[in-house]
Amino acid sequence: MMESQMESQSQPLQQPQLIVVEQHRQEMEQRQQQEQQTQDKRRRQRFWISMAILNTILIVGIVVLVVTLPGKDDEASAADASLAWQQQQQQGMSNQTTTPTRSPTRKPTTNPTNEDHTTTINPSDERTPFPVDSPDSPDDEGPTEPTNSDEFLADLLLALRLEPSYLETLPQDSYMGKALEWMLREDQQYYPIGRTMPKILLERFLLAAMYFATGGPTWQYEWEDQRSTLSVNFLKNTSVCEWIGDDYMDDQGVFCDENNSRVTEIHVQHCMEADSFPPEIAFLPDLQQLNWCNNKIAGTLPTILGSMSSLTSLNLCLNQINGTLPTELGNLSNLRSINIGVNLLTGSLPTEFGKLENLAWLELYTNDLSGVIPTAIGNMTSLREMSFSENFRLSGSIPSQIGLLTNLEQFNCQQCNLSGTIPSEIGLLSSSLESVAVSKNAGLSGSIPTEMGLLPLEQLYLSFTNITGPVPTELGNITSLGYVDLQETLLTGTVPSEVCALRNSSLNRLIVDCIPKPDTNLTEIECLVPDCCTECH
């Protein structure tokens, strides 16, 4: 009996059921209009007949009515992104084969006529993909479904701005299919039918889709010799706000606002695995922080991410994300932090990033980006940290517009392919810039700008470049300077006494080319060790 139940879960959707879904959607809309007209008429009657006597009751009734009406803002929040998402879904359906991870509660269904074993919903098939437990069956031991499946599907399709025909192409073994089946067969939450699906239930479905899309049933969290199965707290018969880790993992999972009414943060690290980036995450309208760092997520970044208007932090570091940076990310005006370091990104830095005036942290290190640093970065006046290091094909010069970033504290562009000189405009950052790291850029030339003596520098990395000339005496004005690496450059002369004097206070390490050359017995830079320089090369 159990095997027959499991096999019934894998059946494709009937065309008649699709018609029922569409009919129910139309009937539901008509019913809502009729009910609204009736309510308006009754309210007018109560107002004129009982205005004095029932004044207090009327006020309470209006408050209750406003609270229970569907929120139009919730519907509009995903409208701009729905078209792009539908196109991505259709494209994904045409390319999808078998899912890398399968739910342990289902048997995989194979299609003997499909050589690549892709399982899709056949509208002419007599079986259904999301079967419900019949209340008349005495042998049924599965969980009771909270509501009629046709009504739930209709509500869900409306909430996602999808047509009923979407179900015809939905592979039943896809992560979306698994999420639908979980909500229909196993989830015990109540679905109020006859009005717009509540936001928290839509979020519940999207989180379930994220879970199945990233191998949720096999999530194993490993960190500092500790191991735990984060998945045990997902898809529980509780609020999604309780889908978080235990003990030392309490910073992992889903987090909500103080009223537990909307999902605002998702932090899942060290356990997710997916061949493509699930775009459905963009339908969480109130999501502010998305942290999927240190996972095994591949594929390109979907353009629909540019519709997440509430997003303030995007952390996707240490994954396998490829392709280019979507220009649509420039639309996220509330974004404060981007970290997509240590991935496989290619292409150039979008000039549209110049619109991110609130962005404070831009971390794109260790990728394969090319092109130049756009001058539009001068518009990103909130930037505090900017790191493009280890993008070996990132070329061009350091734009002079860097002098407009008056809040910039760290500029890191080591091991790139920069050329030209260090712009003198960098001296305009006299109240903020603490670290400049441009080592291992063989095309970087010219002298060290004397204006750098105006900066509150703590670290200066200029090694393995073709910088020439003497070490500026103005560097001796930087009383906060603690680390200077000038090895393997073309600098000449003597390290100024003003710089050596810093060894008595802040300067802990000063590395220069002060070892005599074997052929001439001359040094590039004269410097006493250890009184001034700490290391000679």
Image (cartoon, rainbow, N blue to C red):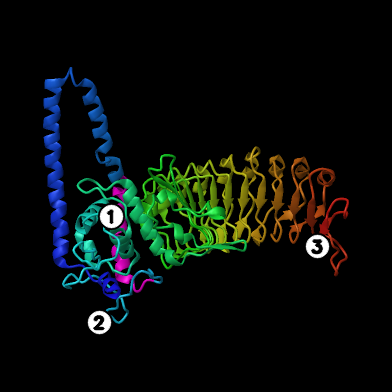
Q: Decide which of 152, 478 is in the foreground and name it.
A: 152
Instruction: Give the residue at mark 3.
Output: 537
* Closer to viewer: mark 1 or mark 3: 1
Q: Where is residue 159 in the image (x, y as percent from the top left)?
A: 26, 51
From the viewer's perspective, tell me whether residue 420 is left or right of residue 291.
right
The three-letter code of the residue at mark 1 reads: Leu
* Closer to viewer: mark 1 or mark 2: 2
Majority SS type along the magenta span: helix
Q: Where is residue 371 in the image (x, y as percent from the top left)?
A: 51, 59
- Which mark, residue 523? none
- Which mark, residue 83? 1
- Secondary structure type for disc 1: helix
78 in the magenta segment: yes
Q: In this view, does 498 lie above or below 217?
A: above
State the residue at coordinates (71%, 49%): 459
Q: Position of residue 1 (x, y in %)?
A: 27, 74
- Where does the magenta region start and end? 77-99
- Secondary structure type for disc 2: loop
- First in sequence: mark 2 or mark 3? 2
From the viewer's perspective, tell me whether residue 295 is left or right of residue 278.
right
- Which mark, residue 113? 2
- First in sequence: mark 1 or mark 2? 1
